[in-house]
Amino acid sequence: MEQNYIRRVTVDWDRVERKSYLRSIPALSRLQSLELARPVTLFAGENGTGKSTLLEAIAVAYGFNPEGGTLNYRFSTYDDVSPLSEAIQLSKGYRKAKWGYFFRAESFFNLASKAEDYRKSDIWVKSKEEYYRRYGGRALHEQSHGESFLSFFQGNDRPGLYLMDEPEASLSPQRQLALLAQIVRMAQEGAQFLIATHSPILLGIPDAEILSFDEGVIHPCQFEQTESVQIFRLFLNRKEEVLRQLLEEKEETL
């Protein structure tokens, strides 16, 4: 934990309005303090349990643009920032992150567009050749969604702080494995990751701490205990039975 850029997350609930929707999310409303003890921390749990909300709040509190990007990115297409960021207090390590980025699958198109704007205005990189070299030889919008995301990540390969919200959304299983390998290598070289994910592949990152948001409280969870892994294994091992049950239930509701 001493090597981490963020060591602890604390929520001051006195700074959250009494009628705020945040208080109706069980896992969040019970959160007082969260220790980040390992280089890779994974947020797991069902939709609506607060994973992305907490991740965004941490990112904004650290200084990232709410819609994603590096610490230098500043753009906005829709103002929908959770007020939780104003109540978040971060205990930082002795190292200051000089690099990093906040990735959101839902806004990556806008992020890629801003990267192209920076390239054209020479704010971010000094030449067209450097931009293309960084992202695999092509502009991000000339690649598929999955290709462009992985190219963006691989083009920003250096020690720093990385917050990622459901990065698997645009990646095939093979590319998820490639991302896993890069995360492990970068963590070994001093990077810190906070990742909200449903991916059984990314949940398998070695030595990562998995924090489950299910059951109304944030708690440590083993890989085998995550709902994503259990459901995925059930479907693979008993596909016909699962499909039959699902389809029969569907017919009964018609």
Image (cartoon, rainbow, N blue to C red):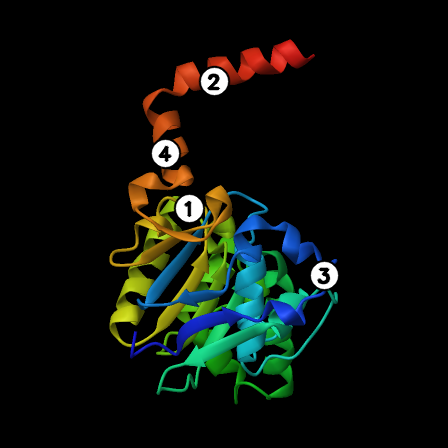
Residue that numbered label 4 is attached to: 230
Q: Is residue 239 left or right of residue 61?
A: left
Q: Helix, strand, or loop for circle 1?
A: loop
Q: Which amino acid does label 3 sit on?
A: Arg
Please name which of the two marks, 1 or 3, marks the residue nearer to the observer.
3
The answer to which of marks 1 and 3 sits earlier in the sequence is 3
- Graded by Cα atoms within 10 Å as few (under 14), some (14 to 19) or many (20 or more), the crowding at tag 1 reads some
How far across and how far down the image is residue 226, in percent?
Answer: 38, 42
Q: Badges 2 and 4: C-beta atoms under 8 Å apart?
A: no
Image: 76 above or below 227: below
CA gap between label 3 and label 4 equals: 37 Å
The answer to which of marks 1 and 2 sits earlier in the sequence is 1
Q: What residue type is labelled 2?
A: Leu
The answer to which of marks 3 and 4 sits earlier in the sequence is 3
Residue drawn where x is 61% and y is 56% of the image: 106
- Quarter of the image holding residue 234? top left
- Quarter of the image holding residue 20? bottom right
Please name which of the two marks, 4 or 1, marks the residue nearer to the observer.
4
Q: Badges 2 and 3: C-beta atoms under 8 Å apart?
A: no
Q: Which amino acid does label 1 sit on?
A: Ser
CA gap between label 2 and label 4 equals: 16 Å
Image: 218 above or below 136: above
Please name which of the two marks, 3 or 4, marks the residue nearer to the observer.
3
Residue that numbered label 3 is attached to: 18
